[in-house]
Amino acid sequence: MAEQVRAQAKHIPIAPRKVRRILEPFRGMEANRAVAILKTMPHRAAHPVAKLIRSAIANAEEKGLDIDSLYIAKLYADEGPGVMPGKGWRARWGSRGRYRPIRKRSSHITVVLEERLAE
């Protein structure tokens, strides 16, 4: 089995739904190429994802792996804890005078890089 390297970024203040939107095309892609593409993307979530992949590449380099043969084996975003601000209450549309909390969502992003075996 090929050597794996993992990196995780926690408490990123972006909703996981918005992060997941950009992750799909990068699964299975070469790690250096993914970072280059993420730098040109206009999405706000692209910056922390690119930073995380660079961190995983640095972890692989520290382990002594060939960084040119790394590819993204797993890339996913889970839901982190939400922040409930003190005055974060707002009436919702059609709520007939009732109010709901404003939900400030956060994400935990995980990337697993794997070394592609030479065939």
Image (cartoon, rainbow, N blue to C red):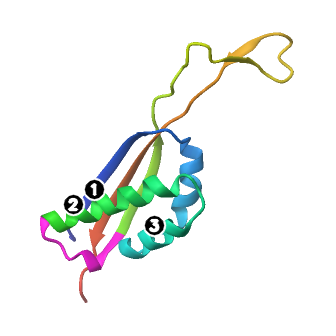
* In this rendering, position of residue 62 left or right of residue 45: left
Type of residue at label 1? Arg
- Disc 3 designates what residue? 27
* Mark toward the start of the polypeptide (1 vs 3): 1
Regarding residue 28, the answer to whether it shows in the image is no
* In this rendering, position of residue 29 left or right of residue 100: left
Give the extent of the magenta segment. 63-71
Q: Quadrant of the N terminus?
A: bottom left
Where 1 falls versus 48 (above or below)? below
Type of residue at label 3? Arg
Q: Secondary structure at mark 3?
A: loop
Type of residue at label 2? Asn
* Real-space Cα separation, disc 1 to disc 3, in angstroms: 14 Å
Q: Nearer the viewer, mark 2 or mark 3?
A: 2
Asked if marks 2 and 3 touch (Cβ < 8 Å), the reply is no
* In this rendering, position of residue 112 left or right of residue 13: left
Number of numbered discs: 3
Q: Position of residue 27 (x, y in %)?
A: 45, 66
- Disc 1 designates what residue? 6
Q: Position of residue 71 (x, y in %)?
A: 35, 72
Tell me, yes or no, whether the highlighted magenta stretch contains residue 68: yes
Q: Secondary structure at mark 1?
A: strand
- Disc 2 designates what residue? 59
Q: Nearer the viewer, mark 1 or mark 2?
A: 2
